[in-house]
């Protein structure tokens, strides 16, 4: 059901901008939502399972367009490529394990007080969806 809703939302957004819904754009959007948090290379691998002819450049362009449309967003969770994930009503903070690379989500309310203080004291508005906190996950913390 979610994919059908995404498809119609994507189609409507594209039409309103004079663009069309292509199979590649649809596949990229579906891959992002299926993978949860994924780099462009991971999205490309997922898309290639269905459409082997889609190249990485097409994936990057589709991700850029989908982000402009507000359907996906990205965060920098490592030193490499950005990680994309679907946009939902529930913004979250990314928790990234420095040892195993696992990515977990935490509710944005965890940073609400800090975000409010920064806005009041400095006029700075935190984009919670781009926040990544690095440390050790519970599993890796046990072994260190």
Image (cartoon, rainbow, N blue to C red):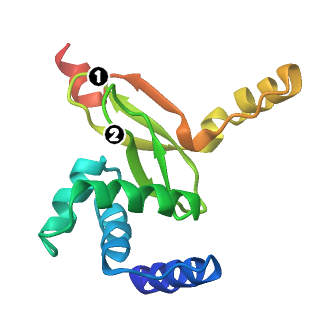
- Element at label 2: strand
Image coordinates of residue 96 in percent, x first then y, are 36, 31
Task: State the residue in front, 112 or 44.
Answer: 44
Residue 3 appears left or right of 144: right
In the picture, the disc for residue 5 is none
Q: Quadrant of residue 54?
A: bottom left
Sequence-wise first label, 1 or 2: 1
CA gap, disc 1 and disc 2: 10 Å
Q: Quadrant of the N terminus?
A: bottom left
Residue 121 appears left or right of 142: right
Picture layout, residue 92 above or below residue 15 = above
Q: Name the residue located 16 percent from the left edge and 74 percent from the top edge.
A: 51
Q: Quadrant of residue 119?
A: top right
Image coordinates of residue 22 in percent, x first then y, are 37, 80
In the picture, the disc for residue 103 is 2
Image coordinates of residue 32 in percent, x first then y, are 35, 61
Image coordinates of residue 26 in percent, x first then y, are 36, 76
Q: Which residue is mark 1?
A: 98
């Amino acid at each position: 059901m979610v994919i059908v809703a995404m498809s119609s939302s994507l189609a409507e957004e594209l039409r309103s901008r004079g663009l069309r819904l292509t199979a590649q754009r649809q596949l990229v959007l579906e891959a992002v939502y299926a993978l949860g948090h994924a780099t462009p290379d991971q999205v490309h691998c997922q898309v290639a399972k269905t459409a082997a002819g889609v190249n990485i450049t097409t994936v990057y362009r589709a991700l850029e367009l989908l982000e402009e449309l507000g359907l996906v967003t990205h965060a920098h969770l490592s030193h490499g490529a950005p990680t994309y994930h679907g946009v939902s009503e529930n913004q979250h903070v990314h928790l990234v394990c420095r040892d195993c690379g696992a990515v977990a989500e935490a509710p944005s309310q965890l940073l609400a007080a800090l975000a409010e203080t920064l806005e009041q004291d400095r006029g700075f508005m935190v984009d919670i969806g781009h926040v990544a906190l690095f440390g050790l996950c519970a599993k890796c913390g046990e072994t260190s």
